[in-house]
Amino acid sequence: MEKLFIFDTTLRDGEQVPGCQLNTIEKIEIAKALEELGVDVIEAGFPVSSPGDFNSVVEISKAVTWPTICALTRAVEKDIEIAAEALKHAKKKRIHTGIGTSDFHIKYKFNSTQDEIIKRAVDATTYAKKFVEDVEFYAEDAGRTDNEYLAKVVQAVVNAGATVVNIPDTTGYCLPTEYAEKIKYLIDHVDMKNAILSTHCHQDLGMATANSLMGVINGARQVEVTINGIGERAGNTSLEEVVMAIKSHKELNIETNINTQKIYPLSKMVSNLMNMPIQPNKAIVGRNAFAHSSGIHQDGVLKNLSTYEIIDPKEVGINDNSIVLTARSGRHALKSRLDLLGIKVNADKLSEIYEKFLVLADNKKDINNDDLLILAGKEVGKS
Ligand code: KIV
Ligand code: ZN
């Protein structure tokens, strides 16, 4: 099994979402939970951006022991000095510096040239290496950067000592085949020495998870993710999706350090602290992600879970019953819930309750345990 490093940026890219700002105490709470989850790297903030962000990186560095703490910078000396200062208490530290490499960025953001951008990339990497051993370089908008030029940038920063090179699809533009080709091109054309490539995908076209996985399949060994896929605009790649896809597909021969049973509680924590509800049909952590409501599916999972479930919800820390009783449920599902409630019924009694259940279910979205107790003629609160 090859190790895939999980780089969590919930507290940096994720926290850029308007209305989701966290205070330092809340960030420390999430950082500690990320440590328990088993992430390898926590991107704690962008220290030069504000005194609050600087302070959060300092406090997270003190509070967390095992994961590497990472701070973001632009390819600017002052940013790098401030990031190094903010990281001074971290047991393991990384500076994440970089610059835009697409023609859009070179022309409109920097009014510069490809050669000048490579020089600035190398200067920033070399400067960051004066402060920390572990330097990650990001080629912003790599998704829309020509592969040949991108390979030159990556080679130059690896030669300057970058330990990780991040290939962000900043605008969420790439198709999975395109992103796969990009990573493969870099693996084939750059002498990576001991450095690794990292994926950093955005969700603008709904392809962040697919793109990240295609990056991994083609040789990237770090993925940058956020809890619940939180992030600017349509968001970032979600940690839970990538981790569970990797875990479900053993044939990839890749493993992560994530304790998957901690996923759901952390997802809830992030959603609550950031005031960001999770859509009910969100993969892995949505309210309906493991809920079976049609009669045919319920009958199948009651016979054997593998008929309609690819992941046991307990694996991600969800212990609730996944059978939702609705007007589309069959007798099998009703009997199973009555059994759970300790109500034993024969076939005739089941039919009688089922008739009443259908009438109620036609008028009520889902039927809870109290409703069933009443239908079965039991006292509510006594079961
Ligand atoms: O999306 C992006 O390009 C980023 C970089 C700053 C790493 O978040
Ligand atoms: Zn990003």
Image (tube, rainbow, N blue to C red):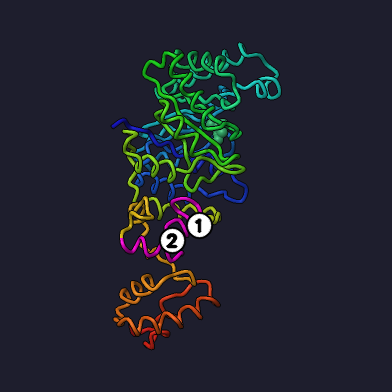
Question: Which kind of residue does numbered mark 1 sit on?
Answer: Asn
Question: Which kind of residue does numbered mark 2 sit on?
Answer: Ala
Considering every residue shown, the one lying at the far top of the view is 115
Percent x, y for residue 48? 57, 33
Q: Residues within 10 Å of mark 1 (few under 14, many from 20)?
A: few
Rendered residue at 45%/12% (across/down): 159
Who is closer to the viewer here, 183 or 85? 183
Percent x, y for residue 326? 48, 71
Q: Is residue 360 above or below residue 5?
A: below
What is the total number of numbered labels drawn onto the structure image?
A: 2
Secondary structure under the numbered disc 2 in the rendered image: loop
Percent x, y for residue 50? 59, 38
Rendered residue at 39%/22% (across/down): 133
Who is closer to the viewer here, 289 or 21? 289
- The magenta stretch spans which residues? 281-303
User: For residue 272, which numbered disc appears in the image?
Assistant: 1
User: For residue 291, which numbered disc appears in the image?
Assistant: 2
Secondary structure under the numbered disc 1 in the rendered image: helix
Q: Is any atom of residue 110 visible in this view? A: yes
Per the model, the C-alpha gap separating discs 1 and 2 is 22 Å
1 or 2: tag closer to the N-terminus: 1
Image region (quadrant) for ligand 1: top right
Question: Marks 1 and 2: which is nearer the front?
Answer: 2
Q: Is any atom of residue 63 visible in this view? A: no
Quadrant housing the N terminus: top left
Quadrant housing the C terminus: bottom left
Looking at the magenta stretch, what is its main secondary structure? loop
Rendered residue at 55%/24% (across/down): 139
| Residue 339 part of the magenta segment | no
Percent x, y for residue 261? 34, 52
The answer to whether the residue labelled 1 contacts the one labelled 2, judged by CB atoms less than 8 Å apart, is no
